[in-house]
Structure formats: structure tokens, C-alpha cells
Image (cartoon, rainbow, N blue to C red):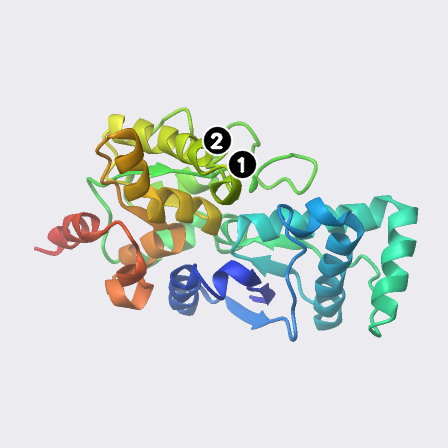
Amino acid sequence: MKYAYFPGCSIDASAKEYAIAAQAINKYLDVEFVEIPEWNCCGSIDAVHAYNPLLSVSLAARNLALAEHMKMDVVTLCSACFFTLSRANNLLRESIDTKEKVGKIINDAGLKYNGGVQVRHYLDILANDVGYRRIRELVKLPLKGLKVAPYYGCLIVRPSGIRKFDDPEHPMSMDNLIQALGAETVNYPDKTSCCGASLVITEEEIAMEMAKSPLMMAVNAQADCIVTPCPMCHFNLDAKQRDIEKHFDVKIGLPVLYVTQLVGLAFGLQPKELGLDRNMVSPSKVVEKIQATRR
């Protein structure tokens, strides 16, 4: 299974471990990422779109045009990129005015987009193209006894009109994946709440309050870790966790893994192969609990 791979800016910088783990498990899943040549920023909902919506859609359209030439569906690991590219794709199909304006812009770069590309999130690929049955067959270290809190965040399944591969209010794709790995899913109310996203730059205290809620709920539900498919969510829950503890005088100490890292551990891959040495909150307790099943 080949896909036109859109890395996005986060994956090339702060979230490298997400991609490292994805590429590691792709070897077992018969999935191949073919990177879109000369890709650019997706058009960022928080940065570019807020400043210039037409520019944002045009940036996305350039990537879609490049992928269309490759004759493959686009796959991205980043929930924000997934949302931005999917929204632009819909606008270009539904708004004649937007299509004409954007068409003129990308035509100046020698490109044309005919609307023939589907935008997919990697979680969608795991759940629906690879499938839970195949993933279950590849598990070497069943995650028995591990309690995992799935954290979808707000962009991967909402709004439902963007691209629906899961229920926008009660998503289960990651829950089912976690269970296929042998782990137990922890049910808690905040699994589709917003982590604070880029408010961490402009309104840090508000963002930390928003991130604290799912973290504390997961801790109170006795989760061993949180798992997410989103770089922004991972940053706010993992990298900012110590700041949250200090600011609110609370103890959390909850490892936050990318979904690809959890899959890799169940496949028997070593922590370093999955970039777990880059995680800010040490995942050692999770790794030790999983590896204890070998004894």
C-alpha cells in the first residue's frame, strides 16, 4: 500500500519521533510512504489561515496538486495538517469562487489541481486499510495489563463534514487499535477535548489549564499512559507537562506516547527504534511493564 506522504512542519522538527516510529512499523504493515516532492507548509489553521485564508488554501492546494500528479491518496501523521488539507480540499470542490482564485495562484507555479486526491490521516490507514486483524497478528508483545488513555484531540474527527472516518463525538478507531495490541483502554470524558493547541504561544496559562484536564482525568482513571495521534497534542501534554505540574502545584508524571510508538512496542521493537528517547516524560514505566511480559 503506497501513499503520497505529507510530513508537515512539526514532523520535520519537534515531532520526529512520531515519524521514526511510523516508518519502523510500516515495514511490518506493508505500508510505504512516498514523500511528496518539494512539499510546503499545509497552510496552518492557526498561523497562515488566521492571517490570510486564501493564501492558506493555496498552500494546501499546491501540496494536493503535487500529490495528484503522483496518483496516490495523501497521508499525513499530523492532525492539524490533516484538518487543513482536508478543509482546503472540500473548499476547492464546493466553492467555484475559491477554486478559480486558488487555481490562478497555483497556475503561476505551473500547477493545476483537479480535485482528485483523498486526504487521509495515518490513524485511518491503520484502522481501515491495514485493519485491526492484521495488526493483532503482528503483535509479539501483547500489552496485557497496560491501561491506555486514548487522546484523539479535537481536529482528527471534527468537524464531521471535513472527512469522516470515525464518530466525531465518540471515536473508537484508536480504542479498537489499542485493544488489538492487547492493552486495556481507559474511558474518560476528555478524550476528544482540545489540548490548548497553539494558545500555548499566546495564552500559555489558558492552554496549560486545557491540557491539565485530560492529563488529570487520565491519572484519576489509573491510566499507565496517554496515547495520541497528534503532534500538537503531544507537545502540550508531554513537553509542557512539567510546566503544568509546577504552575498548578499538581503531580502528574504520566507518559505520553504517539500511537505509532505504542504499536511499535507491541511489535517487539526496541524503544530507541521508536524514538522514545525523545519523549519528555520518561516512558520507562510503560516500557518496563510491557517488557515484563517476556519473563
In the image, is 98 to the left or to the right of 40? Answer: right
CB contact under 8 Å: marks 1 and 2 = yes
Residue at image location 38% in from the left, 51% down from the top? 258
- Gap in angstroms between the C-alphas marked 1 and 2: 6 Å
Q: Is residue 52 above or below residue 29?
A: above
State the image coordinates of residue 287 (x, y, percent, origin top left): 20, 53
Q: Quadrant of residue 137?
A: bottom left
Q: Nearer the viewer, residue 229 or 196?
A: 196
Question: Disc number at residue 116?
Answer: none
State the image coordinates of residue 256 (x, y, percent, origin top left): 32, 46
User: Which residue is denoted by mark 2 in the rendering?
Assistant: 193
Residue at image location 41% in from the left, 59% down from the top? 18
Q: Is residue 234 above or below residue 154?
A: below
Q: How many marks?
A: 2
Of the two numbered discs 1 and 2 on the same chain, state the one appearing first in sequence: 1
Q: Residue furthest left?
A: 295
* Amino acid bearing label 1: Cys
